[in-house]
Image (tube, rainbow, N blue to C red):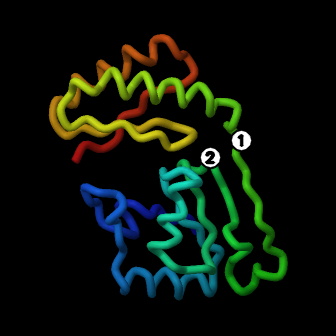
């Protein structure tokens, strides 16, 4: 069972470092993990995914970062029926794009700095941008950067 951390297991908050889930949710996920193979999925990259692990504090789960582009069994943990066979494994199928994504990230930082409230986050295998107002202006700025990079694709997600 795959469970999204940010906005599903935890509420949507302004500061992702404060995305804490409730004790009741933690108990429910922990109970389910006793019977099912469960993974949390986050857009946070491997380095940041540790935050999710610290938020959950459930050793029996597997943690998936970068929206599935990184899969790692942390500390060789898993449900009781998997522990004997668990290994620490890191799978990063798109690692060849990391350098290009880093370049796009740096260009986007410069491009959107004139847009008040706009943020850019490097999530290792993708770059995310956030701005609550002037959404269309931010989209146009991102499109202008991506004209030079044909591989990355712009996807629009929910507007809060």
Q: Position of residue 154 (x, y in %)?
A: 43, 28
Residue sitting at the far right = 85
Sequence-wise, the earlier of marks 1 and 2 is 2
Q: In screen coordinates, is 129 left or right of 73?
A: left
* Residues packed near mark 1 inside 10 Å, few (<14), some (14 to 19) or many (20 plus): few
On screen, 156 above or below 67? above
Q: Secondary structure at mark 2?
A: loop
On screen, 62 above or below 68? below
Q: Secondary structure at mark 1?
A: loop
Residue hosting label 2: 69
Q: Nearer the viewer, residue 133 or 28?
A: 133
Q: Position of residue 146 (x, y in %)?
A: 45, 18
User: Which corner quadrant holds the N terminus?
Assistant: bottom right
Residue 139, image quadrant: top left
Residue at 71% x, 86% y is 80
Q: In screen coordinates, is 144 left or right of 41?
A: left
As drawn, the label of residue 127 is none
Residue at 20% x, 37% y is 117
Residue hosting label 1: 93
Residue at 49% x, 52% y is 44
Count of marks overlaid on the render: 2
Residue 140, image quadrant: top left
On screen, 39 above or below 35? above
* Residues packed near mark 2 inside 10 Å, few (<14), some (14 to 19) or many (20 plus): some
Residue at 54% x, 83% y is 32
Q: Position of residue 144 (x, y in %)?
A: 37, 14
Q: In screen coordinates, is 87 left or right of 40?
A: right
Asked whether disc 1 touches disc 2, contact meaning CB atoms under 8 Å apart, the reply is: yes
């Amino acid at each position: 069972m795959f469970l999204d951390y940010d906005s599903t297991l935890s509420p949507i908050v302004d500061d992702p470092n404060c995305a804490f889930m409730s004790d009741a949710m933690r108990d429910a996920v922990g109970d389910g993990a006793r019977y099912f193979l469960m993974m949390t999925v986050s857009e946070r990259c491997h380095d940041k995914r540790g935050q999710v692990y610290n938020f959950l504090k459930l050793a029996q789960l597997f943690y998936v970062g970068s929206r599935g582009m990184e899969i790692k069994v942390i500390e060789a943990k898993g449900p009781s029926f998997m522990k004997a066979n668990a290994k620490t494994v890191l799978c990063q199928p798109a690692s060849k794009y990391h350098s290009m994504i880093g370049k796009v990230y740096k260009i986007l930082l410069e491009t959107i700095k004139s847009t008040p409230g706009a943020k850019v986050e490097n999530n290792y295998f993708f770059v995310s941008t956030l701005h609550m107002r002037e959404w269309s202006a931010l989209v146009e700025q991102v499109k202008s950067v991506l004209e030079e990079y044909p591989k990355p694709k712009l996807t629009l997600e929910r507007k809060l």
